[in-house]
Amino acid sequence: MSVITRVPEPNIWEEICREFGSRARPPLDDDQMSVATDYADFSATKHHPTFYGHMHARVPGDFDGDSELDPAVSHPACLGYAFTDKPPKPPTPPGPPPPDKDKCPPRQYLEHYVFPYLLPALEAMLKQARIEQCFERKRTKFNALDFITEYLYRRNPKFSDRGDTELLNIPFVKEWLKDHPRPPLPLSLLWTEEEAALIIQSYWRGYLVRRDPEIQELRQWQREWREVNSNIHSRVSDFWDSKLVVAPSTDGGEALSSLSVNYRPASPLPDTTTPASAPLPPPASPLLPPTLS
């Protein structure tokens, strides 16, 4: 039988899966049970679209197909060909009973009690590694041992309540991380390509703005202004301390006598009941700070 379809180009992922599949037990092949299937790439110059994706074979015979062909039922390009489907898969026969795990040799123990759980975990790990682009980059945030640990812990057949348990919530992982804490991952591994491109582009745009001469002049003025106005509270306190005059008191102590700067308050507002034509009262005498006695 022949099938006309598109055959994808081989890549490193298929090579790894092929090597992994060669080590496993070969499954039953439907083609060997019925007929061999030959896959060919579709070409519009060689094949008719009617044959795309269907199993077909040429049927030689001594008959007149033109008189028996019904265009309402079949396409004229199918003349002399037979179409069929793959036979259904037979039911899988039950396997032999597993050996006693306390008395069997190491090889049988691995084949019956370890590999049935470990091989699916390795296959899922390879699929996740492909999603994390481990075959394209030298360094990634993906940790294969952590993935296998979480996978096996969740799918332990003896416990059915571990389906949503994360790696950091596993008890023995918590105890291990208490004594062996891990350093944080660098941002280059945590960011996606879109996030890293956005941050790099924003930093580059900021650099182009900061290198402008007018922007550099503005930043220099802001820097000088911050230096001049730094520690404003202490400068105000030093200013008033320099204006105060300390005079000796009669009891042997020191007192504040006067200020070198006179303070004159503003004139009081006129009374609202006084007519507008009435003269304003004279200004009050300047206030002096009280002296300590």
Image (cartoon, rainbow, N blue to C red):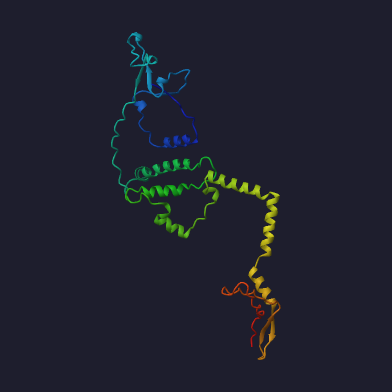
Which residue occupies the foreground of this view, 292 or 221? 292
Return the x and y of residue 212 as percentages of the image width and height. Answer: 69, 49
Is residue 62 shown to the viewer in this render? no
| Quadrant (top left/top right/bottom left/bottom right) for the N terminus | top left
Return the x and y of residue 110 as percentages of the image width and height. Answer: 37, 44
| Quadrant (top left/top right/bottom left/bottom right) for the C terminus | bottom right
Quadrant assignment, res 287: bottom right
In percent of the image, x 42 and y 41: which residue is there?
A: 123
Position of 47 compared to 162: left or right? right
Return the x and y of residue 284 as percentages of the image width and height. Answer: 65, 79
Is residue 209 shown to the viewer in this render? yes
Residue 86 vertical position relative to residue 146 in the rendered view, above or below: above
Return the x and y of residue 119 as percentages of the image width and height. Answer: 40, 42
Quadrant assignment, res 244: bottom right
Q: Which residue lies furthest to the bottom in this view?
A: 251
Which residue occupies the foreground of this view, 184 or 207? 207
In percent of the image, x 65 and y 71: which residue is there?
A: 234
In percent of the image, x 68 and y 73: which residue is there?
A: 239
Which residue occupies the foreground of this view, 287 or 161? 287
Position of 284 compared to 110: left or right? right
Residue 244 vertical position relative to residue 141 in the rendered view, above or below: below
Which residue occupies the foreground of this view, 66 or 100? 66
In percent of the image, x 53 and y 43: which residue is there?
A: 194
